Image: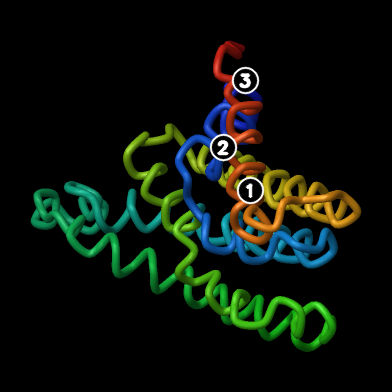
Amino acid sequence: MEYVNIFVKSVFVENMVFAFFLGMCSFLAVSKNVKTAFGLGVAVTFVLVMTLPINYLLENFLLKKGALGWLSDGFADLDLSFLSFIIFIAVIASFTQLVEMVVEKFSPALYASLGIFLPLIAVNCAILGGSLFMQERNYADLGEATVFALGSGIGWLLAIVGIAAIHEKIKYSHVPKSLQGLGITFIIAGLMGIAFMCFMGIKL
């Protein structure tokens, strides 16, 4: 039941985009086409699901105070938490490079359409934010951390695909010239954020 609670909260209640405004640069820039948005969303979800559990293990068995107690009693008071940022980013960058190579190999069209935003997954604050939230919330086990990663990724995927679908529809609408481009995008993102606020009362 706790896994379901974490998953639903991370998708709807604590959505990375609409609750914490993380990953907004990619969200706004690659939200013009549903296919491209879906591809980037899947890539972000994959990187989250792969990196956050690894960072959880590193946090609990290497970085935080007392984590190295399994080596010997002499290391029980050692605190390497100051290395968290650089270690987390190194893990994320490694998997981003892997995703970039796989997409380039098996889907050149998607690779070309994503352009610079695919390698920029490494600095997508939603992914680093996931690892930092994991660190702050101190999840009980690896399963909870993995479910949180999956839910956060799917929440980000829903957000970017949703706004891309709306963008495709409003191509056939009359948008005032002064609102075309980022103007209407900000308005849509704000309305979607208000819509997602209705999930904040969910308690499982």
Residue 180 picture location, percent across and down: 68, 58
Please tell me whether residue 188 is drawn above or below residue 54 in the rendered image: above
Marks 2 and 3, how far apart in space?
A: 10 Å
Q: Is residue 31 left or right of residue 59?
A: right
Q: Residue furthest front?
A: 177
Asked if the residue under mark 3 is in contact with the one under mark 2, i.e. CB atoms within 8 Å, the reply is: no
Q: Are marks 3 and 1 in contact (CB under 8 Å)?
A: no
**Percent position (x, y) of residue 142?**
51, 43
| Front-lying residue, 43 or 57 | 43
Q: Residue at x 73, y 81 (%)?
A: 102
Instruction: State the quadrant of the C terminus.
Output: top right
Three-letter amino acid code at disc 2? Asn
- Quarter of the image with the N terminus is top right
- Contact? badges 2 and 1 (CB < 8 Å): yes
- Identify the mark at residue 199; answer none if there is no mark: 3
> What residue is pinned by disc 2?
15
- Rate crowding at label 3 as few (under 14), some (14 to 19) or many (20 or more) other CA atoms within 10 Å: some
